[in-house]
Image: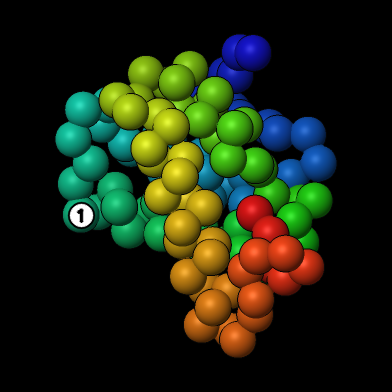
Amino acid sequence: MSYNTNTLLIRNTAMSVQKALNDFLEIVDNEVISPHQWKNFYVFISCAYAVSQIDRPGVSQLSDIFRAKGIKNPGTLAVLYAHGLYTLAINDGKEIYINGFNV
């Protein structure tokens, strides 16, 4: 799977989520993520949380995108995305497993 990370469009993904992901991908360093870059990543997670599951990228899809971008440890970063979504769901009083919120 290949992605043009300069103008990333993910099918069935809300435009606000795509924009936040693109904003992160435009500034992220492939080796070390700075505090400013982490902030952009957190904004992306927040935008993804605000839309339904069908309107945000999945963990495997993000891992592929990060790998195509050349980001070190793409799977780990994708899992951090999932943990961020789960944390926000718990904060909103949602269940995160079984029939609750799902990434």
> How would you rate the neighbour count of disc 1 (Cα within 10 Å): few for under 14, some for 14-19, many for 20 or more?
few
Taking 40 as reference, is 71 above or below it? above
Q: Please identify the quadrant where the N terminus is shown.
A: top right
- Residue at 59 percent across and 32 percent down: it is 60
Residue 6 visible, this angle = no
Q: Amino acid at mark 1?
A: Pro
Residue 35 visible, this angle = yes
- Residue at 37 percent across and 18 percent down: it is 70
> Which color mode does the image show?
rainbow
Determine which residue is flagged by label 1: 35
Q: Please identify the quadrant where the C terminus is shown.
A: bottom right
Give SS at disc 1.
Answer: helix
Residue toward you, 59 or 40:
59
Image position of 17 (left or right of 63): right
Q: Which of the 4 image quadrants contains residue 12?
A: top right
Image position of 28 (left or right of 94): left
